[in-house]
Amino acid sequence: MASAKKSPPPTPSPFWCRWQAARGLEGSHLTIPDADLGGKWAIITGGNNGIGREAAIRFASCGANIILGCREPPPHEKHPDVTASDCKAAAEAAGHNSSTIKWWHCDMCDLASVEAFARRWLATGHALDILANNAGMGRTASGKLTITTDGFEIVHQVNFLSHVLLTMTLLPSLARAEDPRVVCSTSCMHYLGRFLPRTDANRTAKPTSYSNNKLYFQTWLTELQSRLSANPNLEHISVQGVHPGFVNTGIWTAVKSAEERREGGKGPLGDAVYNFFVSWFGIDAQQGSLAIVRAATAKEYATEKRGGEGGGRYFNRIWPAVPMPQTLDPGCRQEMWDFVGEELGLKDKGLLEMLDAL
Ligand SMILES: NC(=O)c1ccc[n+]([C@@H]2O[C@H](COP(=O)([O-])OP(=O)(O)OC[C@H]3O[C@@H](n4cnc5c(N)ncnc54)[C@H](OP(=O)(O)O)[C@@H]3O)[C@@H](O)[C@H]2O)c1
């Protein structure tokens, strides 16, 4: 039988090569080694799409059991069922046939849903090895201040507050893991943030809300790490903030309300501008996910107690970087800690007791 002759791949033109190099893609294409995650458990918020989805697939191929924390998404977004079966396929392709991979409902716009998700996890009795606090949104299409049913500005709640609540509720489960990692998707946009939690957090619609909340998140996680490190029962938990890179995902498209989607029409002009730039200059979601995967698996991200270089840091993709000074300033960190504790009523919920108990 005559076999089809395969033509060689076309040689890229010198112009194309130079253009790729100028975009930084050649120099920034990363590969990282696989870790053995057999028997480990990982939770990833926003795991159905974008960077979180790619991180989940990689964790699955390394043998992890995974719970994707997702909302029932709007129709135009990838459904968590699809990502869960993609993860299962990746696991099986790598010989991990008995991994547990599921998605559970967790709407970051709704604190009750986040609490229910966390309680459901605690009820399993499993130790939690990896918590990827990844879900996020950019801005709303209307540009108007959107307040959730819990009374918070929507970006503040989805990107930051809900992850604080989730992490604090899951601490007992993280504490039981051997080398637990909490990886928070912050952003280089935190460099554009203004540190005004008490006056601004629930009053700004866009676009500063995104950068401000990434700054708040990086500040809060730094303070959390220092409190964990001071407690012999919790000092092995590593918390890191990672910027995944400039990644071509859905985050650049403004979120429309249900009414706006029904009405149809184009999104705001900003969408076209962002999407043009990210499609030319951005890296893909798989490359973006490596920041999370690396922080969750590589030895150097562990606490000193576990032989690593310590937590509470900020990484530009996989490289340690110096974050905004507020994140390191004891006064700002205390202010952030107190503010978010009050907003979420963490003391009344009993979620500070574990940290306080020495
Ligand atoms: N892309 C970048 O260049 C970049 C740069 C720096 C930092 N980051 C951060 O990386 C993280 C992941 O973003 P991405 O780029 O992968 O964007 P993405 O593709 O838009 O993914 C965002 C994820 O968050 C989920 N999400 C949004 N609102 C939610 C809600 N109310 N409840 C539950 N899940 C919700 C989305 O679920 P649905 O499918 O249901 O909407 C989706 O799974 C974000 O925290 C983002 O701020 C991204």
Image (cartoon, rainbow, N blue to C red):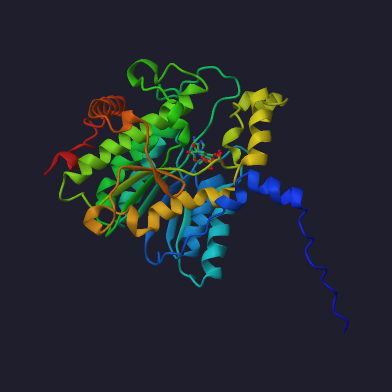
- In-front residue for pair 284/198: 284
- In-front residue for pair 258/61: 61
Seen from this angle, which residue lies furthest left?
A: 358
Seen from this angle, which residue lies furthest right?
A: 2
Residue at image coords 48%, 55%: 102
Is residue 156 visible in this depiction of the protein? no
Seen from this angle, which residue lies furthest bottom?
A: 1
Establish if 282 lies above or below 87. Answer: above
Residue at image coords 46%, 63%: 33
Q: Is residue 261 shown left or right of residue 160?
A: right
Is residue 114 visible in this depiction of the protein? yes
- In-front residue for pair 74/134: 134
Q: Is residue 204 shown left or right of residue 352?
A: right
Task: Give how far across and how far down residue 214 sits, in percent.
Answer: 42, 32
Quadrant in the picture for residue 117: top left
Q: Is residue 326 shown left or right of residue 34?
A: left
Image quarter where the N terminus lies is bottom right
Task: Give how far across and how far down residue 282 sits, in percent.
Answer: 61, 42
Image quarter where the C terminus lies is top left
Quadrant in the picture for residue 9: bottom right
Establish if 210 lies above or below 40. Answer: above
Task: Give how far across and how far down residue 210 sits, in percent.
Answer: 48, 28
Task: Give how far across and how far down residue 273 sits, in percent.
Answer: 67, 29
